[in-house]
Image (spheres, helix red, strand yellow):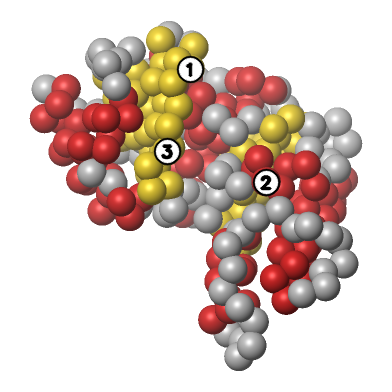
């Protein structure tokens, strides 16, 4: 049994795999992490190994130490103990977040190429993979939650609101106008950017979407071919089973 952990700025997504099957999935807020919460969420699962992908170094260190005590051995850490075996065409390859490379790797294995992987997390990322399985690069945008926070913090009169589904396209209150603008706005942005990228890498490119906010925004997007909320976790499991084997 493998415990796969994707540490994000907002949430820590965890999945327990038996070979290629995802048996259990759960989230823990990154700011609220404790090993007690992790152990409780795992339940009675007998974990043999663990693999971690992270964009939060401080959380990586803490969780890695907890897992070492729990398992009696080190967890695999992507970027340190295991490299994502995909040709990285970034000008400075080390600048690419490991989660983005894992998404690209998982997308190639599960959906083929050419591919556009869109992750609606704390930030929204577009990752582009060529027909030759090369990671070409992508885009980084502020996420839905960050955008709402910025509207509240940088304006005098707009309220602080919680992210959720808009009740109407044309908002008739500040709250509904903000939700409509952010949700419909980013959905249209995702659709248009996907079409523009397809013109560059091929009209047959598939658009795969994932991330913590995909269940909210996915139904407002028109150009997504497949919603896979567990893409990163699946990628970690594939990497572990292949021990970083080539594509």
Q: Position of residue 44 (x, y in %)?
A: 27, 16
Q: To which residue does mark 2 refer?
A: 216
Residue 119 in sight here: no
Disc assigned to residue 60: none
Left-right relation of 220 to 18: right
Q: To which residue does mark 1 refer?
A: 22
What residue lies at 61% left-to-right and 59% top-to-bottom?
163
Q: CA distance from mark 3 to mark 2?
A: 16 Å
Under circle 2, the secondary element is helix
Number of other residues with Cα within 10 Å of mark 3, as a class: few under 14, some 14 to 19, many 20 or more:
some
Badge nearest the viewer, 1 or 2: 2
Pick the quarter of the image with the N terminus. Answer: top left
Q: To which residue does mark 3 refer?
A: 27
Q: Position of residue 162 (x, y in %)?
A: 58, 62
- Of residues 175 and 76, which is closer to you in this image? 175
Q: Looking at the picture, does residue 235 appear above or below residue 221?
A: above
Q: Are marks 3 and 2 in contact (CB under 8 Å)?
A: no
What residue lies at 38% left-to-right and 48% top-to-bottom?
29
- Of residues 131 and 6, which is closer to you in this image? 6
Pick the quarter of the image with the C terminus. Answer: top right
Under circle 1, the secondary element is strand
Q: Position of residue 74 (x, y in %)?
A: 19, 28
Q: Looking at the picture, does residue 27 appear above or below residue 189?
A: above
- First in sequence: mark 1 vs mark 3: 1
Under circle 3, the secondary element is strand
Left-right relation of 20 to 171: left
């Amino acid at each position: 049994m493998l415990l796969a952990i994707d540490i994000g700025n907002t949430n820590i997504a965890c999945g327990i795999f038996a070979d290629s099957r995802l048996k259990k999935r759960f989230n823990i807020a990154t700011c609220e992490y404790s090993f007690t919460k992790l152990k409780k969420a795992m339940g009675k699962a007998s974990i043999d190994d663990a693999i971690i992908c992270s964009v939060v170094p401080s959380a990586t260190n803490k969780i890695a130490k907890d897992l070492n005590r729990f398992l009696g051995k080190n967890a695999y850490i992507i970027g340190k103990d295991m490299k994502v075996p995909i040709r990285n065409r970034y000008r400075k390859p080390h600048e690419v977040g490991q989660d983005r490379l894992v998404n690209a790797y998982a997308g190639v294995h599960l959906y083929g190429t050419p591919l556009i992987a869109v992750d609606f997390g704390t930030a929204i990322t577009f990752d582009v993979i060529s027909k030759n399985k090369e990671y070409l690069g992508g885009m980084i945008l502020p996420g839905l939650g960050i955008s709402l926070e910025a509207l509240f913090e940088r304006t005098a009169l707009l309220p602080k609101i919680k992210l959720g589904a808009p009740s109407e396209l044309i908002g008739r209150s500040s709250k509904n106008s903000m939700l409509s603008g952010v949700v419909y706005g980013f959905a249209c942005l995702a659709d248009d950017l996907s079409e523009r990228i397809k013109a560059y890498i091929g009209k047959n490119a598939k658009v795969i979407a994932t991330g913590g906010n995909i269940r909210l925004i996915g139904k407002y997007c028109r150009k997504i071919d497949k919603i896979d909320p567990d893409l990163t976790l699946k990628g970690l499991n594939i990497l572990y089973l292949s021990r970083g084997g080539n594509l």
